[in-house]
């Protein structure tokens, strides 16, 4: 259930929840959601398995919002284990406590509830939410998030005739607890069993209804566990218009690579004869290639799909790299504010620090682990941000991961990297492995200034795009390659930087970036929420003085 209200007429029972956001403008609307998280039987690949449902839905319900909306989501955990939701791409400005990963937020115990208080502050675009604990993501619990521009802010394309959420991703038939046990026992997971489109595989085909001669927006998110996917529509071209909150140059493609964790908006014009057409999603860089289809169904269709599904790229890296370089920021379009996106001249700002992050795989005590700069992350007994607020010693150590690879063997630690508020940093992701990587940074949007094969060196900066690089929150790094980003650290908090390859994230390929200021001003960071759950060494403490 979702209810939208203006801040001037709140039910009394919700007043305490809303009072936390007294700092925001009263005319920013509030939208209320009540979600019950349960297990249920689902059939995504044609056989019954246990899934995670939200209000009985798989995938979960969409969140529709507008820039600066306040989103109040009461989540009741009806599972038999702790649960958290995280909000991929939502920046949680000044409020990492609500990020919904274990480094920031205590889990919701079984049979209990927690109310997330989010604001879509200065954001537009297409994102998604997902369960962040216990490999729950392999069972569902994910859904789309869309943030529309405010009415007075121009959008660089006409309103579409329809606006669809398209959640694609790889899928296992095994229960998430079985997959988790394999990882806990030190084993690697096999190739997924199939590909889903909005929770449906080849045996239960999804369909999207359209009318001839109109233009539709598809918000496509790869919510899977590991596979890069290629998306295409038989007989139609797609115009990319937005990537993770940034309006793009409107470039057309016949197919689009969407790496795990990424989100794109495309416009599709239905300019073909009135019939059914294949929508195809297939895996990239895998053997074998996994494929599934959905249907683009014209009104008054004259017949079913004709011919085989269109083929797409399979293992070609250069094709994908060239496409990625072609996706750039529309400098003249407005973003969440009226001023053009190009008014922020990131290429003219001197970086204050360079961080090089190298992923690796290996065994620790005979079990499979993954690492960043040789450190394989292990969770602490208390969420890091909660421990930081209460000044609880011994939970983590700032500087427990280095800025550069050290070439040593993998070891385990609760890795936290310190960073200064308002620093402007260069981060290089160096991938020396044979597998494509996908990296995500919570709390931020960053500029993807360069990517190429081989080893990054200081000379690699000569090929950086310092004018119109795409700003996004998830970027791919091709095998034996590097990707460089610029990021302005303007959001105080404890932020998860992780692999979106979920087994690698689960087994250590992540760490936390602590963006710190000594200031205690609300202009820099909100205090811990009054309703925050407290666990671990924070149990029994108070979020506010008596």
Image: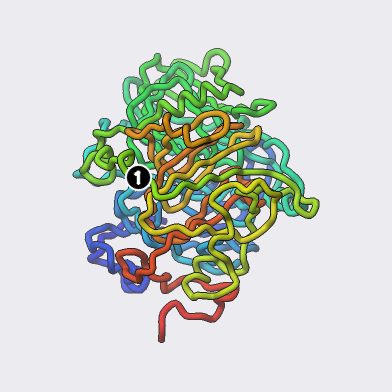
For the residue pair 447 and 126, the one nearer the viewer reads as 447
Please identify the residue farthest to the right as the structure is shown.
Answer: 366
Residue occupied by mark 1: 350
Query: Does the image show residue 317?
Result: yes
Quarter of the picture holding the N terminus: bottom left
Task: Identify the coloring.
Answer: rainbow
| Quarter occupied by residue 241 | top left
Residue, x 40% and y 29% (percent of image)?
327
Residue, x 37% and y 61% (percent of image)?
94
Query: Does the image show residue 138?
Result: no
Please identify the residue farthest to the left as the structure is shown.
Answer: 152
Q: In the image, is residue 314 above or below residue 494?
A: above
Decide: few, some or many residues near mark 1? Use Cα within 10 Å; few <14, some 14-19, many ≥20: few
| Quarter occupied by residue 422 | bottom left
- Residue 180 place in picture, x, y as percent: 70, 52
Q: In the image, is residue 300 above or below residue 156?
A: above
Residue, x 40% and y 37% (percent of image)?
243
Quarter of the picture holding the C terminus: bottom left
Residue, x 51% and y 80% (percent of image)?
541
- Residue 466 place in picture, x, y as percent: 35, 34
In this rendering, would 276 be left or right of 454? left
């Amino acid at each position: 259930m979702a209810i939208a209200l203006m801040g001037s007429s709140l039910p009394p029972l919700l007043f305490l929840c809303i009072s936390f956001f007294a700092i925001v403008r009263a005319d920013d609307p509030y939208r209320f959601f009540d979600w019950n998280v349960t297990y249920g039987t689902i059939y995504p690949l044609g056989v019954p398995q246990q899934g995670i449902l939200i209000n009985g839905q798989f995938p979960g319900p969409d969140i529709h919002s507008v820039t600066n909306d306040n989103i109040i989501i009461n989540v009741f955990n009806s599972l038999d284990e702790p649960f958290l939701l995280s909000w991929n791409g939502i920046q949680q400005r000044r409020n990492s406590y609500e990020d919904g990963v274990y480094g920031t937020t205590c889990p919701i115990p079984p049979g209990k509830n927690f109310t997330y208080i989010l604001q879509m502050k200065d954001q537009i675009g297409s994102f998604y939410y997902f369960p962040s604990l216990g490999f729950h993501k392999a069972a569902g619990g994910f859904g789309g998030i869309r943030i529309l521009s405010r009415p007075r802010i121009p959008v660089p394309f006409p309103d579409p005739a329809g606006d669809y959420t398209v959640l694609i991703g790889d899928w296992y038939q095994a229960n998430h607890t079985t997959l988790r046990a394999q990882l806990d026992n030190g084993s690697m997971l096999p190739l997924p069993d199939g590909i889903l489109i909005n929770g449906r595989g080849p045996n239960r085909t999804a369909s999207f209804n359209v009318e001839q001669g109109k233009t539709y927006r598809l918000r496509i998110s790869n919510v899977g566990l590991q596979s890069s996917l290629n998306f295409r529509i038989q007989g139609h071209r797609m115009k990319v218009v937005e990537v993770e909150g940034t309006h793009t140059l409107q470039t057309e493609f016949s197919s689009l690579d969407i790496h795990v964790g990424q989100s794109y908006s495309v416009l599709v014009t239905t300019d073909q004869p009135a019939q059914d057409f294949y929508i195809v999603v297939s895996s990239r860089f895998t053997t074998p290639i996994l494929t599934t289809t959905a249907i683009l169904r014209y009104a008054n269709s004259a017949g079913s799909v004709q011919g085989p599904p269109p083929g797409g790229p399979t293992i070609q890296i250069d094709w994908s790299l060239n496409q990625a370089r072609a996706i750039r920021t529309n400098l003249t379009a407005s973003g969440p504010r009226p001023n053009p996106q190009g008014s922020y001249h990131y290429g003219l700002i001197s970086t204050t620090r360079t961080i090089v992050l190298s992923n690796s795989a290996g065994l620790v005590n005979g079990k499979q682990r993954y690492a960043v700069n040789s450190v394989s992350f292990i969770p602490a007994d208390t969420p890091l941000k909660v421990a930081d607020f209460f000044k609880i010693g011994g939970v983590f150590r700032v500087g427990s991961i280095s800025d550069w690879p050290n070439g040593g063997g993998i070891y385990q630690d609760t890795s936290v990297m310190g960073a200064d508020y308002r620093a402007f940093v260069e981060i290089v992701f160096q991938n020396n492995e044979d597998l494509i990587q996908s990296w995500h940074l919570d709390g931020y949007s960053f500029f993807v200034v360069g990517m190429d094969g081989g080893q990054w060196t200081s000379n690699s900066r000569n090929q950086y795009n310092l004018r119109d690089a795409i700003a996004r929150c998830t970027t791919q790094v091709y095998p034996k390659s590097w990707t460089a980003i610029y990021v302005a650290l303007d959001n105080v908090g404890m932020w998860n930087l992780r692999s979106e390859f979920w087994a690698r994230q689960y087994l250590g390929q992540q760490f936390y970036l602590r963006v710190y200021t000594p200031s205690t001003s609300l202009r820099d960071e909100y205090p811990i929420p009054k309703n925050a759950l407290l666990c671990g060494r924070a149990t029994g403490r108070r979020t506010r003085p008596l």
